[in-house]
Amino acid sequence: MIQRRELLGSIAVLAAAAVSGISAGPRWAWAAPTGARIRVLDADFDVRPFLGKMQEAGVIAIARYYSRDLDPRCNYEGKMLTRAEADAILGRGLGLVTIFQYCNGANGFDDPKKGENDAGWAVQRAEHMGQPTGTPIYFGVDYNPMPDSGDCAMANAAMANIVRYFDQVRTKVTGGGWRVGIYGPGRVCAKLKEMHLADYFWLSASIGYWGHADFYNYGQWHLFQNKTDLPLYSVKKSRRVDTNITNPNIADFGQWRRTGPPPLVDFSVASTILEARRFIKVSTVYLERDLQTGEIKNPHELHTMLDGVGGRSCTVVKVFGKGVAGINLREGSGIDAYCRLDDLTASLKTMPIIREWPSCAT
């Protein structure tokens, strides 16, 4: 727990850094990642208009969605990958990562036949796209099966539904020659790995979820979604991308091309990407800039990183006096927040635990 005197001191130091940042020239701007650039994006829209910019920014693979037919509840225009878009992505030498998502939030797994039905659609999409057999289709679990109350009975019931779903998915998908991946919380990844129901593991950006840090620090993940909804290539709300970190020790994260070897993120590049970013610890004192104007939000007030905010990744843009860091929270080049340097991890190699959950029996 941070003491009141420490909080008040932090406000003064961070506010001073904010003022010095304002006088130091341009300090807030949207920009594609530079330096240790992100290599993998995922998007819920047709990326063809932005492929040139993405390649210029160092992107080598793009994750896009499979789903059932259009349905206002769980699918929408542009979200699902088309053959024409796949041709354009692959025609530039980029890799594709495919993920099936359809009503995969809370209560989405109650249907006892959902896994069988989703897998059937996924196989159909993979065949239409020309996705090579032997490559994975990820399936999303887009919620935390552990309720905020920490109720183990509810968590175990939710996990049982997820296990049933992936048991059905694995039978259908591997029967067609593809492999199974899971996108979701760390505890779900761990359970499916233990039961041999998935081969690829993509951790969502919701790092406060059940078992997230444990599975990340275990080192068996393939992708980690470090940022969501970034306007790196378009200011439109419906054209925002998510960025993903690759595991330096696992070059194959499910990226594919129809012919020839898929593009890789080699060990040195993947390691540099981890080293260039840091996790923000819980209860970090910080000041943040307004997304639209770039001005400091409430410069005389304290903001504290709590659940859902603590643990976010960032890059350090500048270090000021008294251990204050000017950071970027959105894969840009300018300062958009300030915090204490000691409140950042040394890199992304180890994820901080921002909430303790019960282990439960499952």
Image (cartoon, grey):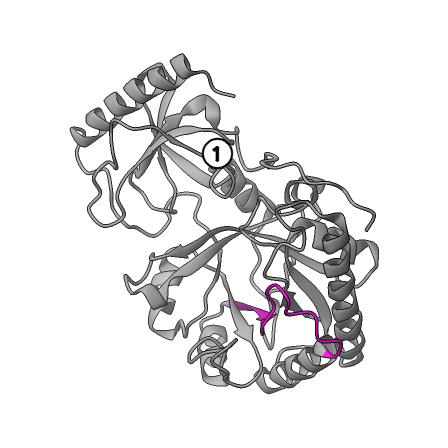
Q: Quadrant of residue 8?
A: top left
Q: In this view, does 198 lie above or below 324?
A: below
Q: Is mark 1 on a helix, strand or loop?
A: loop
Determine whether, in the image, residue 349 is placed left or right of residue 53: right
Classify residue 123 as left or right of residue 233.
right
Q: Does the magenta stretch include residue 99?
A: yes
Q: Position of residue 211 (x, y in %)?
A: 68, 45
Residue carrying label 1: 280
Q: Determine the main secondary structure of the stretch shown in magenta.
A: loop
Q: Residue at x 19, y 46 (%)?
A: 293
In front of the other: 271 or 239: 239
Side of 40 relative to 52 (left or right): right
Residue drawn at x 48%, y 36% is 306
Residue under the image location 65 percent in, 44 percent down: 216
Q: Where is residue 298 in the image (x, y as percent from the top left)?
A: 25, 34
Question: What amino acid is found at the position of numbered circle 1 in the picture?
Answer: Ile
Residue occupying image coordinates x 38% and y 68%? 51
| Residue 176 drawn at (x, y percent) | 76, 81
| Residues rendered magenta in the picture | 95-113
**Residue reaching furthest to the top:** 5
In depth, the one of 89 and 199 nearer the eye is: 199
Please tell me whether residue 300 belongs to the stretch shown in magenta: no
Q: How many marks?
A: 1
* Left-right relation of 110 to 207: right
